[in-house]
Image: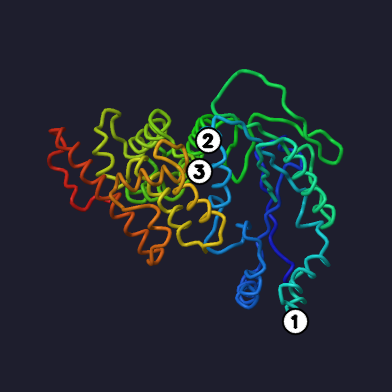
Amino acid sequence: MLKEGLLTPVFKNKGEKNMATNYRGITVLPVLNKVIETIVKLRINPAVLITQNVTQRGFTAGSGPANAALPVEEIYREAKDNNQEYELVLLDAKSAFDVVIHSHLMKRLYHAGIDDKHWTIIQNDVALMSKKTTDMQVQINMANTFAGMEGYKLQPKKSVAINIKPKPTKKETLLEEYTLNEAIMPRVDSAMHLGIIRTNSMKQNIIANIEENIKKSRRSAYALLGSGFHGENGLDMETIIHLFKIYILPVLLYGMDLLTPQSLDLEKLEKFQKKMLKQLMSLPTNTPDPAINILTGILPVEAQIHLKVMTLFINVCTQPNESLEKQLARRQLCIKSMNSNSWFIQVKTIMLKYDLGNASEWLDIQMKKDELLNKAKKGINAYWIERTTSLAKLYTGLRYLTVVVYF
């Protein structure tokens, strides 16, 4: 009974739709499974956390994809700071959870101190980074050897190498070839890692992800609201805005807390949001921007990205001192100047803008996560309320709109 479920094939958005191999099976398990999983997790999690690798971020409380993507993002920024090239290799495991040797998993559970009756019910991206090509090949060989020991395979065709440059360039250079299982790994200009497109430079990362996010957001909006997209679907305005916030905005801003776009790139996202909100509210295209923010209560894109950046930074601050993200934060905030492209220097700049204090002090601050989030939200909201109020005064038609309960 525990192994029964409702299987739904979901298209991977690549390849032909009439090929079964281009679909991913998503199984909805019985509620009883979730209850048992929760009980077992509460019992064994304390023992697992003691032996868990410090770099593991999947299935870890208080962590998410952004935590795992942060070191990769910092490498791109380091390349720009040092005017130096780096190598990024993304390895893909083939059906790792299906073919991994179960006896090896049981052995790891035993060494973690889990050796009782829980055994009766307990029955895939890797990113490698290096400045030297020789070191990278060694890392690939080590990952491949470990995969062989654990019973799963790394796919040479889906595992790719990317050369990270300080800035975009059309100049072609002869690059080192890497091998995986005696097969040459393909070199590509872009690849997906944790939902974020990784390219040859920090600038291209921003451009590629913004274009993709806008495309996905537009597709999500029309799929969700259909023919009634222009305010004629019978839904009240409050419901439409709520749907926009929970279904479209997360898609539009995914990964932007790491990429932190500026100026023209940021303006692309802002224009898309304003245009879509005007369509949803059936407002003319020449409606003043402050009116959109006041009527919907939605912050400008810049403010939302800053809030997401602070949320991720607060997550880093509340990590254990031995975590990779927190150690990286201490190092970068200590040695990097304000001219650096480091993500943590971007955080420092944002905190200065909203008068939130010193970033280094937040790493050791004795406050709960919710308290830090409320402090960040309060500072960011206060700034944008003041700014929106000031802009609204410049439009005679907005003099009767109140901004007291804004956001």
Q: Quadrant of the N terminus?
A: bottom right
* Mark pair 2, 3: CA separation: 8 Å
**Image quarter for residue 279?**
top left
- The amino acid on which the numbered mark 2 sits, given as a three-letter code, is Asn
**Sequence-wise, which precedes: disc 3 or disc 1?**
1
Q: Residue at x 67, y 45 (%)?
A: 127
Query: Which residue of the protein is positioned furthest toward the top in this rendering?
Result: 171
Classify mark 2: helix, strand or loop.
Answer: helix
**Image quarter for residue 177?**
top right
User: Which residue is under mark 1?
Assistant: 116
The disc placed on residue 209 is 2
Q: Is residue 55 left or right of residue 286?
A: right
Please report contact status of discs 3 and 1: CB closer than 8 Å, yes or no. Answer: no
Where does the image place residue 210, in percent across and percent down from the top left?
A: 49, 34
Classify mark 1: helix, strand or loop.
Answer: loop
- Residue 231 visible in the shown view: no
Q: Residues within 10 Å of mark 2 (few under 14, many from 20)?
A: many
Which sits in the foreground, 302 or 359?
359
* Mark pair 1, 2: CA separation: 47 Å
Please report contact status of discs 2 and 3: CB closer than 8 Å, yes or no. Answer: yes
